[in-house]
Amino acid sequence: MGKSNCKVISRDKDLDEVEIQRLADGLYLGDQPLEAPRLVKTGWKAGQMFELADDPDRMQSFRWEAPSFIERKDPMIQRQKTSVEELDVPKAGPTHWARIVRGVFDEEDCAELISCINRKGFTPALLNIGGGRQALEPSARNGHRAIVESLEMSRWLLEVIRPYLPETFQRGTLIDLNERCRVLCYTPGQEFPSHYDGCFRRSAPDPRAGDRSMITVQVYLHDVPAGSGGETTFMRERSGREEAALSCQPCAGSVLIFTQNLLHEGSLLKKGLKYTLRTEAMYRM
Ligand SMILES: O=C(O)CCC(=O)C(=O)O
């Protein structure tokens, strides 16, 4: 993440099982109660640093199994359920834009996806500090995260949302979606301060080396009720200060797609829970 500022935010106290379960009370996906997150106890300390080899995101040790709807549901049929709304973001135009696509995932698919991710469980979100290293800096970034690599899911998702992504963008050609999906789970008091999404580049020995992300794909896995906070908010800079310009309230199965040059935040979650998944559209120059 290219951080634009570093608001000081309070460190989430360790929640016990009962408290975690209570956060999900009253939240539903369709007619099913929303599954509470499995927060893995790590014992990590603020300021702790991790090398690539430490594998804090358990990419090597956890075997991911994709949700079954990916096999069962034809993405071209799912595409027919979608609709789009263009958003009036700051500096809106050909190079700066955001749109919300609704109906990308059905509610039962969001629920299955959350269950699959909960099998891995969430650990505190780390901050990239360069050279493949990460650090636990709750004063700059405070949330729970699970990263999964899922080619089958990113391919399915691309086929559903392809009409809403430009085939060419700033001289690049759309190749695929990043299979590295970062799933965030916010509990009350957590937020992701304003930032520009960093550019993800593929490197050798990946045959797609050189491909780079240009557009963020943010999937909302359930409804976050208005009044609970947890919006994705686009910011504008005015006289050197940042202010909220436009907020998107998460709605189950919808996907916010936006160019990576837009300043935004995951606004403070005041109550309940918020699960969201981020990947990005990859382009070849
Ligand atoms: O939680 C959100 O709404 C935004 C998350 C975000 O900005 C990110 O993952 O980079």
Image (cartoon, rainbow, N blue to C red):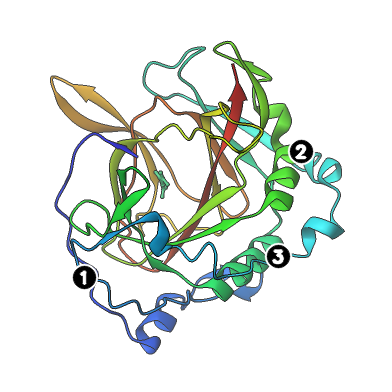
Q: Earlier in the sequence, mark 3 or mark 1?
A: 1
Disc 2 to disc 1, C-alpha distance: 41 Å
Disc 2 to disc 3, C-alpha distance: 19 Å
Secondary structure found at label 2: helix
Identity, as a three-letter code, of the amino acid under mark 2: Glu
Q: Is residue 198 above or below residue 227?
A: above
Q: Identify the image quadrant of residue 137.
A: bottom left
> Mark number for residue 45?
1
Q: Earlier in the sequence, mark 2 or mark 1?
A: 1
Q: Is residue 154 above or below residue 100?
A: below
Which residue is tagged 3? 108
User: Within 10 Å of the Cα at label 2, are there few (<14), some (14-19), or many (20+) other Cα atoms?
Assistant: some
Residue 83 as seen in the image, left or right of residue 21: right
The answer, for residue 34, to whether it is visible in the render is: no
> Mark number for residue 94?
none
Which-is-in-front pick, marks 3 and 1?
1
Secondary structure found at label 1: loop
Q: Quadrant of the C terminus?
A: top right
Residue 141, x across and y down, in percent = 27, 53
